[in-house]
Amino acid sequence: MRQIILDTETTGFYFDKDDRLVEIGCVELLNRKLTGHNFHVYLNPGRDSDEGALRVHGLTSEFLRDKPVFSAIVDDFLAYVKDAEIIIHNAPFDLGFLNMELQRSGRPKFKEHVSGVVDTLVMAKELFPGKRNSLDALCDRLEVDNSGRTLHGALLDAELLADVYINMTRGQDALLMEPHSPQQTGVVITKVDLTAIELPVLHASSQELAAHEEAMAQINKASGGKAVWLQSA
């Protein structure tokens, strides 16, 4: 199975307000193993980055001035992601920018080029409800070394997210195992007849029964005599 871990950096936070992509970073997983076949490009957005975005990624207009525009790399990018499953943290953000850039280049939306998109932020919220689930928080929780992440960078973040994703989905291989896979060759299943085994029945003592009745009476009193088990008796 081919999967691509994808991250982007942008001039700001609003794809519908003239913000643009400045970096795309992707790493490839094949059967859940990194292949080293990465895709990474800096882009000339044709505008300055907002101050808040610049503090996040540090990619100045001077650095990006001689970089290609998105339309110059779109074919290589789409060829790289074609038919793969794409894994993104907070996917709506990146997809909004990718779809905007693709539209400007006269191309269909991103999901029409790939087999599907997995949002690891949604996964993390299900696995760790009520906790912080930023990429940094997940790295700390799952013991992924992010000590080199002083600024956000699309390729570095994609590499970190790959480790986070593999940790969050560890054990899936066993769940996805085919019923007659080679790993099961030689397994012998023995059926045991349990019908002759007589299980002991442990009865409550008189003290335990009295304590139970007292507890039920207290619950009934606290509910104003609305205990349903007494009403149905």
Image (cartoon, rainbow, N blue to C red):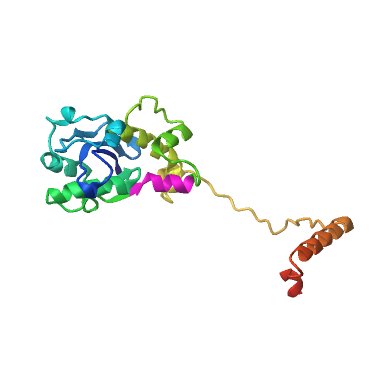
Q: Is residue 67 left or right of residue 187?
A: left
Identify the residue at horizontal 30%, vertical 31% (top origin): 55
Total label count? 0
In percent of width and height, residue 94 lies at 28, 45
- Which of the 4 quarters of the picture holds residue 56? top left
Quick check: is 123 in the magenta stretch?
A: yes
In percent of width and height, residue 163 lies at 38, 34
Q: Can the viewer see residue 177 in this picture?
A: no
Q: Which one is in front, 231 or 177? A: 231
Identify the magenta region: 118-127
- Which of the 4 quarters of the picture holds residue 19? top left
Q: Is residue 208 left or right of residue 130?
A: right
Q: Which one is in front, 74 or 206? A: 74
In percent of width and height, residue 62 lies at 16, 27
Quadrant, the C terminus: bottom right
In percent of width and height, residue 123 lies at 42, 47
Secondary structure mostly taken by the magenta-highlighted segment of the chain: helix
Task: Give the residue at the far front of this rendering.
Answer: 51
